[in-house]
Amino acid sequence: MDRERFIAAVTQEQEPLRRFLLGLCRGNAAEADDLAQEAMLKAYLAGTSFRGQSKFSTWLFRIAYNCFCDRMKKILRRETVSLETPDARNVRAGGASDDGFRHQELYAALDLLQPPEKSAVLLFYMEDRPIKEISDILSCPEGTVKSHLSRARAKLKNILAP
Amino acid sequence: MNMLTDPSIPTDNQLKDFFQSRKPAIGDGRLFMDSLKAKLLAVEEINRMKAAHIRHTRKLLSIVFLCGILAGTLLLAAMQALHLPEAHNSLLAWFQSVPEPVKLLLCAAIVTAALLPSLKALNSG
């Protein structure tokens, strides 16, 4: 895939991908964009390995999810900076108050979940992706994705309680 | 209580409403793409430079090997021309003492090492 075609393809995917990573990074926009660009660069360099067995979007999300997992592992190994920084929690909360509150609610809900559950929830409920595609992105069977979603629903019941 | 019958467990639709109404706003897409394009160009440039460096190293290696073979041949010829039979004979004796398979392997390795980089270098321009 040449550069122009690649850019055209990722332009369509950049918004949902960055939003997905923003959710995973608990609102840390700089971290999310950095991961998105890392994933896109990896995808570009590995362009020949894309055989069209899945959608380009699924392939790109899978690379991005792997990048996120790798970074999490590195952070855990170093045991220094956590993604849960104050700016991550309160990102954009300083702007319009309704918007800020809604985002705080979102990150509070996501904080209750383990990373695979969080990924499944973001892809299924926020990005409206089918289970099959989520299982491809997370590299796990469809049954596991359904279990993640089921566990997440149970954990989120307090958030949605009136 | 069974999760399926627990009324406090939110439904898919409730969760969809919750998450879809709270989609976080992302930054400027144009800025992001401009930065990505710049990185792609930089990566391409680095790859081009790496490829050129590899080609250059191969050419250099092939020249070194060919020069080595040429020098060895000239040395042998010079020994004969200058009538240094002792040195020539001791070298010859050493070569003859080497077992046949090792001799073959040695020759094959020298020829391959000399020819492969040259061929690759010629092929890649």
Image (cartoon, rainbow, N blue to C red):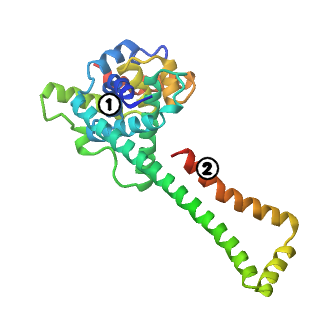
Q: Quadrant of residue A67?
A: top left
Q: Nearer the viewer, residue B110 or A32?
A: B110
**Is there a contact, CB below 8 Å, between mark 2 and mark 1?**
no
Q: Chain of mark 2?
A: B
The residue carrying mark 2 is B119
Tell me if I can see residue B119 in this picture.
Answer: yes
In this rendering, do the residues under marks 2 and 1 share a single chain? Answer: no
Q: Nearer the viewer, residue A125 or B6?
A: A125
Q: Residue at x 46, y 16 (%)?
A: A130
Question: Is residue B54 shown left or right of residue A105?
Answer: right
Structural crowding at the residue carrying mark 1, measured as other residues with C-alpha within 10 Å and reported as few (<14), some (14–19) or many (≥20): many
Q: Residue at x 54, y 30 (%)?
A: A139
Structural crowding at the residue carrying mark 2, measured as other residues with C-alpha within 10 Å and reported as few (<14), some (14–19) or many (≥20): some
Percent x, y of residue A44: 42, 35
The residue carrying mark 1 is A18
Q: As shown in the figure, which amino acid type bears the numbered disc 2?
A: Leu
Tell me if I can see residue A161 in this picture.
Answer: no
- Which mark, by number, is residue A44? none
Q: Residue at x 18, y 30 (%)?
A: A100
Question: Is residue A101 shown left or right of residue A49?
Answer: left
Q: Please say if A67 is above or below B63.
A: above
Q: In the picture, which quadrant includes the C terminus of chain A?
A: top left
Q: As shown in the figure, which amino acid type bears the numbered disc 1?
A: Arg
Percent x, y of residue B101: 85, 63
**In front: label 2 or label 1:** 2
